[in-house]
Amino acid sequence: MRSVLPRSFKYVMSGVVLALACGTSGRRGDTIGQTQYTEPILNLRLVGSYGPVFSDRITLIGPSGVTVNRIGEILVSDRSANSVYKFSPQFEIISDEGGIGAAPGAFNRPVGLDCDQALNVYVADSGNRRIQVLDRSLYYVGTIDSYFDLNDESSKFSQPEDIRIDREGNFWIADNDRVLKLDPFNELLQELSYDVAVDFGIGRVSSIDISGSDLLAVGDRGNKQVIIATINGNHISDFAAGSPSCVAWDDKGLLWVADDIAGRLEVFDIDGNSRFRHAEAVSEFRPSWITFDQSGRLIMLDSGRRKIYVYEVIRGIQR
């Protein structure tokens, strides 16, 4: 069986992405990237906490990835339960999909995920070395486990940890020690890695994010750093950031970095200057993944306490 999606299926999927994406899910607005830091971050105010138990059937065990679609629904992956859950904006469970294994709709350590404007869900199924595509109801649609390289030869994914869809419908995949940019037909457009001529080196990539102003952030756990570049691969900055488990742009052009090992959140500008840091005086605090909803609230997965936390970001006025 061909490892890449059949051409007919690829054209159907790419048509959905191209016609309806024009950007990605609602968590990254088109106005991101205005780097005028007129309102410094003062604090985080907790406005809600959810889990670990949501029903007799659903309990968070190892929450690992979170994203928000364009209508405000929250998608969460759980690498220990090998499941993906969809919640309403009020964190009521809507649907779920999963089970351990390599069958369609089953997972082996799912991590990062993203949604397109048609509300399809793309999940980095890390242990199975593939991307799984689910529809808005979390029914299985298809699998992508390889792509066509620059020589038009099929190349397998190594260990995908995260995926983003840009405004043109291209897929950005954090695949072990490289970042791949694929067009909607799964053909390689660009690779950032030690193997190609770039201005920076990449170790083990845990997370990626793209701002509304088309800046790429790479969480590099292998080199304990964060890399910021343009989507054309031009280096902007790189700086030490502990062991980043997730990176996420906010609507002010600041980059938030979660470190589940050190147990902290830290915010940087694009030059790597620290703007804010948050930690909690409990040993179980393990922020594994973060994102923002349409109102700018921070949604954080805490793998230590196996819960989802929602914060309002309190900002002040620069004097």
Image (cartoon, rainbow, N blue to C red):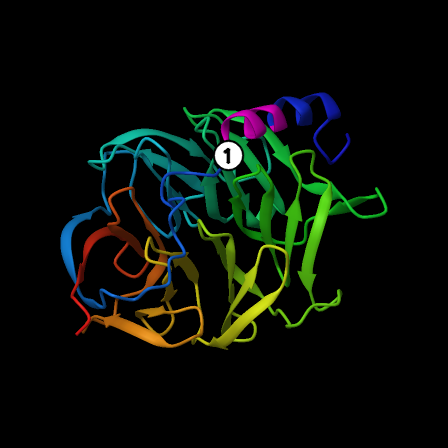
Task: Tell me if residue 108 can be seen.
Answer: no
Q: Quadrant of residue 143?
A: top right
Give the vertical position of 241 relative to 287 (above or below).
below
Q: Tell me what residue is drawn at x 52 percent, y 35 percent.
A: 106
Q: Which amino acid type is marked by label 1?
A: Cys
Q: Looking at the rendering, in which quadrant would you find the N terminus?
A: top right
Q: Position of residue 5 (x, y in %)?
A: 70, 30
Q: Tell me what residue is drawn at x 68 percent, y 49 percent.
A: 157
222 or 211, nearer to the observer: 211
Q: Tell me what residue is drawn at x 84 percent, y 42 percent.
A: 152
In the picture of the structure, the residue carrying the numbered disc 1 is: 22
Label 1 neighbourhood size at 10 Å, few (<14), some (14-19), many (20+)? some
Q: Quadrant of residue 194?
A: bottom right
Q: Looking at the rendering, in which quadrant would you find the C terminus?
A: bottom left
Q: Tell me what residue is drawn at x 16 percent, y 65 percent.
A: 316
Q: Position of residue 68 (x, y in %)?
A: 35, 40
Q: Position of residue 73 (x, y in %)?
A: 31, 34
Q: Position of residue 109 (x, y in %)?
A: 50, 49
109 or 46, nearer to the observer: 46
- Can residue 294 be found in the magenta stretch? no
Give the vertical position of 269 relative to 119 (above or below).
below
| Tally of numbered tags | 1
Task: Tell me if residue 257 can be seen.
Answer: yes
Q: Which residues are magenta?
A: 14-22
Give the vertical position of 110 relative to 69 (above or below).
below
Give the vertical position of 96 relative to 164 (above or below).
above
Q: Is the magenta region chiefly helix, strand or loop? A: helix
What secondary structure is found at the residue carrying circle 1?
A: loop
Is 43 displayed left or right of 179 in the figure?
A: left
Is 111 displayed left or right of 126 in the figure?
A: left
Is 167 displayed left or right of 157 in the figure?
A: left
